[in-house]
Image (cartoon, grey):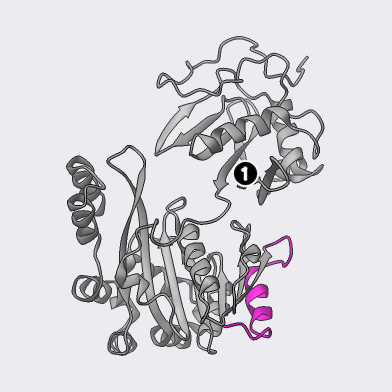
Amino acid sequence: MLDGRLADLGPGNRPASTTGVRWPDADRRDLRWVEEARRHAPGLDGLLVWAFESNASRIAFQSGHPVWVRIHGQNHQVTERAVDDYEFSQIVNHVYGADGMARLQMGKDFDTAYSISLSRSRRLRFRLNATPTRTPRRDGGNIVMRPIADMPPPLSDQLVEQGILDNYRPGHGMVIVSGATGSGKSTLIAGMTVAKLLDPTGNFDIIEGAAPVEFLLERVRGPTSTMNQTEIPRDLPSFAAFVRGAMRREPTDIIVGECRDSETMDAAIQAAISGHVLTTTIHANNVPLTMQRIASLCPPGERENLISAVAQSLRLIINQRLARSADGKRTPLREFLVFDAELRSQFLRTDPGEWPALTSRAVEEKGQSYRAAIASAARAGRITEATAAYELRQIG
């Protein structure tokens, strides 16, 4: 009978990590992943605290598999024994609620946040996605948890370029941060937001909708600025509903956690052309592909009008990726383009099918390309020559 313990029931099919990275409590026979759902999870919380303190960027639980973590871009198997079906269902119901596993079994995934209270003043937070999966023997599931820092690093620590610092606070219009999952998009936007909140002359009223809320920035008490955050879908059902409501609350800035569908893009564009600063993220691998993605997300029936609005409202696009740094950790590389009046006029006159080509030329002439970012990072000693060569191959 499955007893829910972490005790070794025999070695797994694969050896534990050979890199020496392993959870110290993996062999404890008295430690369960979850003792009481929604109340006490000593094994789960213990592993997550250890992973957080080890600078892990990703912790993955999968039914029938050992636990894996990703640290500075490298994967490590940190338990020898697999998580069985009973343990996996306990973990799911603990982090989501009593119907968590039932939701997965109905073919539905979920996003949420999970927190661990270490003391009155310290809490660790994780963003979490749970997804049903298929295995050779049965239905399964996968949970990926990503640590959220208590507060974002300041922009100086994020090595933000001067060209971005000079242009991330437009009076109105769209600021887009794009990149792959886990590339630091939310951290960069949060750093920008904190800088605004702490500016004594800012007078910003910032409203954010995110899925989930990562950095709890309403705790930042700005001298002249305010912050309000809403979690999607826990507080409101969709990003589009959030944007529509936000426009009635007279904010200076609206932050949309992600533009992932046509409805959200439509709402975001309407906010950007209505006198607000609209900041959002998009999944794309460079600035030209971000422009292509924007056009593809405009609803077909309104595409012509919305694309025209995009051309008028864009102010800044930043694309970010993380590269292996010379010290074995991760360092940001950024491609970016500032949209001045002349460039916006060019886009307004250009067929959207030609936007990527126009954007590529503009990045080289007016912005910062990835080639320039890689060369700069190599000159500064942030990345090695080998890493620079690898990153250049990645951008083609």
- Quadrant including the C terminus: bottom left
Question: 342 or 188: nearer the eye?
Answer: 188
Residue 396 visible in the current orientation:
no
Residue 28 picture quarter:
top right
Side (left or right) of 50 relative to 159 = right
- Which residue is tagged 1? 131
The amino acid at mark 1 is Thr
Residue 333 picture quarter:
bottom left
Side (left or right) of 121 relative to 214 = right
Helix, strand or loop for the magenta stretch, by majority: loop
116, above or below 270, in the image: above
Please tell me which residue is depicted at 48% across the width and 63% down the height of the picture: 191
Residue 347 picture quarter:
bottom left
User: Where does the magenta region start and end?
Assistant: 232-252
- Quadrant including the N terminus: top right
Determine the secondary structure under disc 1. Answer: strand
Please tell me which residue is depicted at 26% across the width and 48% down the height of the picture: 382
| 367 part of magenta stretch | no
